[in-house]
Image (cartoon, rainbow, N blue to C red):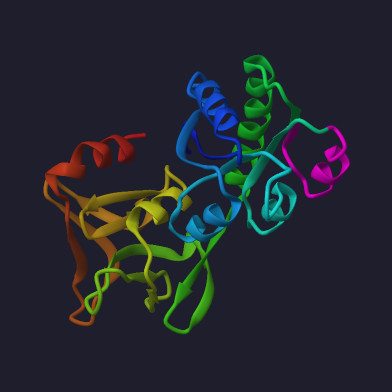
Amino acid sequence: MNTKLKCLLLDDELPGLTYLKMLCEQIPELEIVKTFNNPEKLLSDIPDLDFDLLISDIEMPGMDGLHLAEMLENKLVIFCTAYKDYAADAFNIDAVDYITKPVKLERLQKAITKAFERFEKSDNSRKFMQLNTDKGKTLLYFNKIQYITTAASDSRDKTVLLTDGSFMNLKNVKFDTLLHELPDADFCRINKKEIVAVKAIKFFNHNEIVLHHLEENNKNTALILSETYRSDFLKKVKL
C-alpha cells in the first residue's frame, strides 16, 4: 500500500498554480509528480506519468477541467475553481471534492483525506491491472502471477510467468509502474530484472530464491536475490 498519493496539479494561471503547489507541499499525504498550466500538455504527457490524483482548475483556455477529468481512467480528481456553477457537473463525473477559490489549507487537507480514503478502498479491492501485450490488451490478475522478468528480446518489455505455467509478454512497461499497481504485501523486487510473488517462493537464502515452478528440466526455477533489494525482501517475508 502506498503511503502517499502521487499527484498532478493543473491551473492555467501561474500564480494560482504556484499557490496550490505551496499548499500541497504542506500536506504529508501528497507527493507532487508534476505541475501543469496547460491541459493539452498534461493530456499528452499522461502515458508517461505515474499518478493517483489530479487537482485541477475547471475554466481554462482550450480544454476545461471537466472534460479532461472525463478522459482519465481510474484516477481521483479534486477541482479547485473560482466558480460555484460547476459543482453538480463535477460530482456527476465522481469527483472526490469541489473546492472554491481562494483555497485554504484546511479545506484542501479535508479533500485530500477523502481522496486517500477512496484510494485505499479501491486499492484493497483491486484484483487485476490492465496492460498491453504483444497480442493486445489484457487483464492481468495478481493471483495468477508467479514472477515478472525483463524480456530477453527487448528490455522495455517484461515477461510474466503465470500460475498455469504459461508466459505472457507485456509491452513497454517499467518495473516502477508494475510495482505501483501490484499489492505491496504480495510482491517484491529481488534484483534489477525481476519481481517475484511471495506465494510463489519455495525456498530462499541470502543470495537465491527458489520457486515452486518446475522448468522443462524438472528443476525448480532459481532466481538471484541481489544485495540492493535483500533488506526489503527479508522484511517482507518476515511479516
Q: Is residue 171 depicted above or below 232 in this figure? A: below
> Where residue 167 appears, x then y in whole percent?
37, 77
- Indicate left or right for 20 with 45 as reference: right
Residue at 70% x, 21% y is 102
Q: Can residue 199 be seen from the camera position used here? A: yes
Residue 182 appears at what percent x and percent y?
45, 52
Q: Quadrant of residue 68?
A: bottom right
Please give the name of the residue rendered at 57% of the width and 49% of the height, measured from the top-left corner. Answer: 38
The image shows residue 122, relative to residue 27, as above or below, that is: below
Q: Nearer the viewer, residue 23 or 11?
A: 11
Q: Is residue 94 magenta?
A: yes
Horizontal side, residue 205 vs residue 85: left or right: left
User: Which of the 4 image quarters holds residue 37?
Assistant: top right
Q: Position of residue 121 (x, y in %)?
A: 64, 40
Q: Residue at x 73, y 43 (%)?
A: 59
State the extent of the magenta-drawn residues as a range: 84-98
The x, y position of residue 80, in whole percent, is 70, 33
- The answer to whether residue 197 is seen in the rendering is no
Q: Identify which residue, 110 or 153, lies in the foreground.
A: 110
Up/down of 171 relative to 38, above or below: below
Look at the image and tell me in which quarter the C terminus lies: top left
Confirm whether the magenta stretch covers residue 186.
Answer: no
